[in-house]
Amino acid sequence: MEYQQHPQWAQALRQVAPIVLGYVPVGFAYGVLARQAGLDPAAAILMSVLVFAGSAQFIAISLISTGASLATIAATTFVVNLRHALMAAALAPYLRSWSWARLAAFAAQLTDETFALHAHRFAQNARDAAETLTINGIAHTAWCLGSALGAVAGGLIHDVRPWGLDFALPAMFLALLGAQLGSAAHILAATSAALLTVLLHAWGVSQSVILIATITATTLALGVDTWKRSPSSLP
Amino acid sequence: METLAVILAMTIVTYLPRAVPLLLCARRAVPDPLARWLGFVPPAILAALLAQSVLCAGPNVDMSMKNLFLWASVPTALVRWKTRSFAATVAAGILSVALLRAALL
């Protein structure tokens, strides 16, 4: 009944469900580790409310526990999250009609997962601001809820792996990637980015892997696409 | 107090890269080569995130037969291809990992 009065909520919930399934257990793990690193529950939860960046929060926790300086933690967080600049720039052209306030709110909740979902939605002309921000709000709430449960009740559950929930986010990336392979150049961008990511990890690079792989792969795809389009490339 | 300062600093350095390009690019026409370049960002970034989460979840790259996520990716990709459903794909992925773990224990 409630859903019939608020179809927007039902729509948003249906789309964001996979992110919620992934965020609650990962947020829980973050909460547990934050407590082990010496943060009190309020600080652990506050970080999820204000920062809302999964991998950067895990890295910050480990830096805090080793007594790193504020400057080190801030610089590392910046580098780890720089990939979001690419995501923001890629989504921006779809949001021309949005107000400054809505753009500012959207930016605060732009994560790998909400980006993946919106890149798909926006390309299909689903750009309703209220629905988009509701999706982000639910995802952010799930992240904070998981963090709070982990920070407060961390001793109760040690391992969520038997439920397979740790594969929720990889499965979501896979599902959304499938919708992005529209042309040969897009497939080239995807395969070269995946290959570069694995190579960089194999070579021991641990920082900015996603950023480096993405910039290289998109530039390669643009180069090949431009070359194939230009008449002078005909033999 | 120190922790609060750390959290606030993290908030600022996380928000700026998310907000600045969005606010800059949402109000003006992006030049054509840049627009096309940005069009390749979603497939590249999603493939990079997928590769990282499946093959580089541990300390080392794992492309061995013991990589459970690699195995689970096969039925997950099949369901994506057959159903084109986002929810069904994620459900298939979670179920595959849960079943594989149960079978191997």
Image (tube, coloured by chain):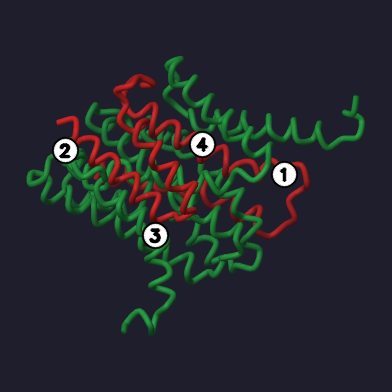
Chain colours: A green, B red
| Residue denoted by label 3 | A16
Frontmost of labels 1 and 2 is: 1
Give left or right: position of A182 versus A78: right
Frontmost of labels 4 and 2 is: 4
What is the chain identity of the residue bearing mark 1?
A: B
Q: Report the residue that reaches farthest toward the front.
A: B82
Q: Residues within 10 Å of mark 1 (few under 14, many from 20)?
A: some
Q: How much space separates mark 4 and mark 2, taking CA atoms?
A: 35 Å
Q: How much space separates mark 4 and mark 1, taking CA atoms?
A: 18 Å
| Residue denoted by label 1 | B36
Give left or right: position of B90 versus A108: left
Frontmost of labels 4 and 1 is: 4
| Residue denoted by label 4 | B47
* Tag 2: amino acid: Gly
Q: How much space separates mark 2 and mark 3, taking CA atoms?
A: 32 Å
Image disc number at residue A38: 2
The mark that comes first in sequence, 2 or 3, is 3
| Residue B77 screen position, x and y as percent | 44, 41
Tags 3 and 1 both on a single chain: no
Q: Residue at x 24, y 35 (%)?
A: B100
* Tag 1: amino acid: Arg
| Residue A7 screen position, x and y as percent | 42, 78
Tag 3, which secondary structure?
A: helix
Tags 2 and 3 both on a single chain: yes
| Residue A200 screen position, x and y as percent | 49, 20
Tags 4 and 1 both on a single chain: yes
Tag 2, which secondary structure?
A: loop
Tag 4, which secondary structure?
A: helix
